[in-house]
Image: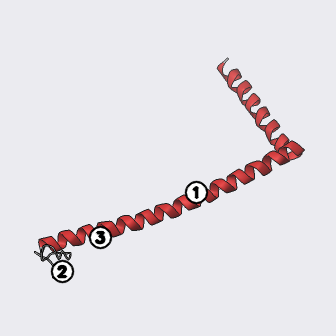
């Protein structure tokens, strides 16, 4: 009985998918739906591209920040002062 249930479900799912595909490909309403989906997908791709660019910028900022932190620790371990502070009389070595 279990095999018959699987076959019945598979036939129903296949028929539903075939009906949807036929609607999308062969009707005027399907053409409008495809065009609408195409516009939404293009917008989604544009958003993903902008997001990727933002991530790359954030990576660059994080890299520069980490480099600055490493420079400060390196200077401190070498007994150098890594910045100018006229109020405290400190300067870069």
Nearer the observer, 80 or 24: 80
Label 3 secondary element: helix
13 relative to 62, above or below: above
Q: Earlier in the sequence, mark 3 or mark 2?
A: 3
15 relative to 89, above or below: above
Residue highlighted by disc 1: 48
Give the residue drawn at x 16%, y 79%.
91
Q: Rounded to the nearest whole Å, what is the CA distance between mark 1 and mark 3?
A: 28 Å
Location of residue 72 in the rendering, given as x and y in whole percent from the top left corner: 21, 70
Q: Earlier in the sequence, mark 1 or mark 3?
A: 1
Location of residue 83 in the rendering, given as x and y in whole percent from the top left corner: 20, 75
Left or right of 75 in this view: 7: right
Give the residue drawn at x 82%, y 44%.
24
Label 1 secondary element: helix
Q: Few, some or many C-alpha atoms within 10 Å of disc 1 (few <14, some 14-19, many ≥20)?
A: few
Which numbered dot is residue 92?
2
Give the residue drawn at x 74%, y 24%.
8
Q: Rounded to the nearest whole Å, what is the CA distance between mark 1 and mark 2?
A: 43 Å
Q: Are marks 1 and 3 in contact (CB under 8 Å)?
A: no
Give the residue drawn at x 74%, y 48%.
37
Question: Of the residues tagged 3 and 2, which is closer to the observer?
Answer: 2
Query: Could you tell me which quadrant the C terminus lies in?
Result: bottom left
Which numbered dot is residue 3?
none
Label 2 secondary element: loop
Residue highlighted by disc 3: 67
Query: Could you tell me which quadrant the N terminus lies in?
Result: top right
- Give the colour scheme of this rendering: secondary structure
């Amino acid at each position: 009985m279990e095999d018959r249930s699987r076959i019945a479900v598979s036939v129903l799912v296949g028929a539903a998918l075939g009906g949807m595909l036929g609607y999308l490909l062969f009707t005027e309403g399907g053409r409008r739906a495809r065009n609408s989906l195409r516009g939404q997908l293009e917008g989604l791709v544009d958003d993903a591209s902008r997001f990727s660019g933002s991530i790359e910028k954030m990576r660059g900022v994080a890299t520069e920040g980490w480099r600055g932190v490493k420079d400060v620790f390196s200077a401190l371990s070498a007994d150098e002062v890594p910045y100018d502070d006229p109020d405290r009389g400190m300067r870069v070595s």
